[in-house]
Image (cartoon, helix red, strand yellow):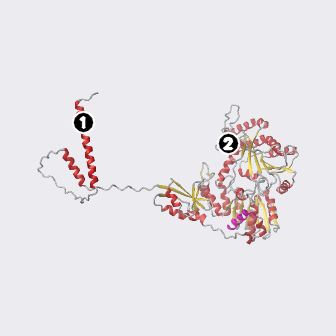
Amino acid sequence: MALTDEQRKAIALKREEALRRAAKIKEMELLTASSSSVNFPPPTRPVFQSPPQNRQPMKSTSNSSIKQTTMNNFITQPLKPAPPTPNIKPTIVVKLKLDVEDRVKIEFYPFHSAIVDLIKQVPSRNYDPNKKLWTVSLSEHSTMSNLLKNAQSVKVEIEPIPMNILGMMTSFKPKPTPSDLTKIMDPELIKRLFPYQKEGVTFALERNGRILLADEMGLGKSVQALTIARYYKADWPLLIVCPASVKGAWKKQINTFFPIIHRIFIVDKSSDPLPDVRTSNTVAIMSYEQMVLKADLLKREKYSTIIFDESHMLKDGKARRTKVATDLAKIAIHVILLSGTPALSRPSELFTQIRLIDHKLFTNFHEFAIRYCDGKQGRFCFEAKGCTNSEELAAIMFRRFMIRRLKADVLKDLPEKRREVVYVSGPTIDARMDDLQKAKADYEKINSMERKHESLLEFYSLTGIVKAAAVCEHILENYFYPDAPPRKVLIFAHHQIVLDTIQHEVNKRKLRSIRIDGKTPSHQRTALCDSFQNDEDVRVAVLSITAAGVGITLTAASVVVFAEIHFNPGYLVQAEDRAHRVGQKDSVFVQYLIAKKTADDVMWNMVQQKLDVLGQVSLSSDTFRTADKMHLRFNDVNQPGIAEYLQKTPEKGDGEWEDPADSEPEVICDSPAPKRIKN
């Protein structure tokens, strides 16, 4: 639409007015800039005068004169300084946490170079580029804290280490001990120890003989314990409490390393006597069961030096044997705990063992569980099933009472062991798949928790039965075929019927063997082990995972085969180390035989998850995740528990259970077990 003449004139006037205003503004800016170098007199306060009564009419003033007056007034007014910009410091959250080896970790967020500059002022600082973590020495913890509190360029919010925890670390002072143990002990005995074993003895003497010796299995904990106890021979007789199956092994160790000790009392039954004379060459050896039965007598005798072997058996604070052991430990002067797996399932099980060594360190389980076991009130009771502040707990334990060495770190000449998972199959397993389906259906019908547990154990037992024939075939075909090179093999299983099946097939092949299970008398175990170790014709050891997994040495074998898996990874590692320990001269090859679409499918992953938890507290270096797999990689962290697995509805069209690892790529083992290889 075309503009009228009037509209055009109005637009032109507005444009001229806008240009004039812009020119005035520019003029004012120039005047302001030039006036900045002129010193103006201080302004005088204007005096208010009331207007006269007879006001004259206001003279008309042009628009330009008003603007000029405004500009003059503006120039004569003093310039006001700009308001100061507030100095806002960034807030940095800094967490101080205990770390192992008497170090303090420094974690902070968000990142700020000022914090790094403060850390660099501490002489003991160290940066780990792999973990991207700064640490300082525990002795300079207060220095670091003061630097953070007095930071100038940033505001620091510190999450400190609790004072009681700091007290546990800083109040402890090791007792002076000579670096050369031959100056205070039998030189011939000390010469027989490995360097790391000497370090273990020194560690114990610095702590008055109250320690948890948590070396990995196979590193000679019993010899270290006896050497430590021998230093305190003035406080003998020595009491050794251990599983019934290893009493003979302890006696053999004493005879080997301490032939001067000639009074050894082995308590097998209630009528067996305890030492009647307190001498420095007297030792009493008994099981945990006999300890409970003789509790009153032991308390009256007031044993001053006690060794608790496999101390994880004292994990249950409500158990009678734990209560008796705690009472004895309070009376004793020197208490030595031995366990390659001090927390078999949960870190919460460490509490009772800690109290055996120092009952004043952690006095309240509830507080201990909240800080270290993710303790919280559950639906029905207080639960302590997790693992929190694991580095702090490990640091306290290493500082105060625990020493733990790994085979890879201290015994370089010990051959490595390698694990392999083999998925066995065959017509016998396929034929019993209907029975497995029925076990699943029966489980789903049960509402009682007690009966559900029984049903679950039945499913586990059925799994062993179903795969027993395939297991035997695998072992015989791979290790004892005609013209096979001579080798000794340990075969572990859990259920008696599986052990019987293996024993039957071994006998049919006319292979000489030994068998140790829960029915084997303890006094026969040593002779059976010696037979396996020394007789070249004894080729097979058929062993119970729970009854033969501790206290025996079978290093003549280089192959370990698990026909069944156990729920508890500690038992599996212990069983492996019957062969992988001091004295082994060959590489140890460990095979786990798994039957797919049975309880084995999920138990393998459950074992790894338990070991992962223990690893956070530095109590397990083992991992089954790196085991070589035949045919299938089984490493699904979202794997359901056994109960969930049983409740799962089949999704396959032919009634098969869906394999939880079907989405994983297949991996063929690089070096499977040798089969029919002739020398």
Question: Would you place residue 521 above or below residue 598 in this image?
Answer: below
- Give residue 250's quadrant in the image: bottom right
What amino acid is at disc 2? Ala
Q: Residues within 10 Å of mark 2 (few under 14, many from 20)?
A: some
- Residue 469 percent across, percent down from the top left: 81, 41
Query: Which secondary structure, mark 2?
Result: helix
Q: Main secondary structure of the magenta part?
A: helix
Question: Would you place residue 109 above or below residue 234 in this image?
Answer: above
Q: Is residue 176 left or right of residue 527?
A: left
- Residue 547 in the magenta stretch? The answer is no
Residue 643 is labelled as 2
Which stretch did the figure color magenta?
193-207
> To which residue does mark 1 refer?
12
- Residue 230 percent across, percent down from the top left: 76, 68
- Give residue 273's quadrant in the image: bottom right
Q: Which quarter of the rendering shows the N terminus?
A: top left
What amino acid is at disc 1? Ala
Q: Residue furthest top?
A: 1
Question: Would you place residue 623 above or below residue 234 in this image?
Answer: above
Closer-to-camera residue (461/568):
568
Q: Earlier in the sequence, mark 2 or mark 1?
A: 1
Closer-to-camera residue (159/330):
159
Task: Answer whether labels 2 and 1 touch (C-beta < 8 Å).
Answer: no
